[in-house]
Image (cartoon, rainbow, N blue to C red):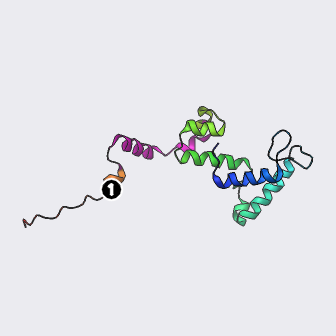
Amino acid sequence: MPCRPPLTELLYAHLKRYGTAGDGRLFRNFTGGLVGESTIARVWDNARGTVLTEAEYASVLARRPYELRHACVSTWLAASVPSTQVAEWAGHSVAVLHQIYAKVLAGQEEAARERIDRVLGLPTAESRSTPVPQTPDDGGT
């Protein structure tokens, strides 16, 4: 999975400060065991309360940590990252990816046609909407 430089820096800082659990997990409780679900829920709720507006917090927006993963995969698909790459990063098969995220892919037909036209060297909607420069009259009238 790709990791952007700012997140990579945060993860390295965390590793430098806290290390990993004996089995390599990044996060652990005080005794080195699994972090409890109630702890995760409490920390997540505090984070939501810190960064969201009151209306956003009251909504279902990012109600569970899993929704970040869903939003990330949806963003990759909406950005036209190939399904095979997204599936690999997300740990899904392409079939499962399309089954779960089909609604993200819907409505991208025109953008797909534009990319095909560009590859084939055909005029695109963008180039068709660009005004053609007028040639100056050669002094006839």
Residue position for label 1: 129
Quarter placement of the C terminus: bottom left
Start-end of magenta stretch: 99-124
Q: Position of residue 5 (x, y in %)?
A: 64, 53
Q: Position of residue 127 (x, y in %)?
A: 33, 53
Q: Is residue 120 magenta?
A: yes
Quarter placement of the N terminus: top right
Using the image as rendered, state which of residue 65 and residue 22 is in the foreground: 22
Q: Is residue 119 magenta?
A: yes
For the stretch drawn in magenta, the main secondary structure is helix
Residue drawn at point x = 18 percent, y = 61 percent: 135
Residue drawn at point x = 88 percent, y = 48 percent: 29
* Furthest-front residue in this view: 16
Q: Can residue 63 be spotted in the picture?
A: no
Q: Position of residue 45 (x, y in %)?
A: 79, 57
* Furthest-left residue in this view: 140
Up/down of 92 relative to 10, above or below: above
> Which quarter of the figure has residue 109?
top left
Residue drawn at point x = 86 percent, y = 43 percent: 34
Using the image as rendered, state which of residue 119 and residue 94 is in the foreground: 119
Using the image as rendered, state which of residue 27 and residue 134 is in the foreground: 27
As shown in the figure, which amino acid type bears the numbered disc 1?
Ser
Q: Answer few, some or many: residues within 10 Å of disc 1's Cα (few below 14, many 20 plus, some between 14 and 19).
A: few
Up/down of 72 relative to 89, above or below: below
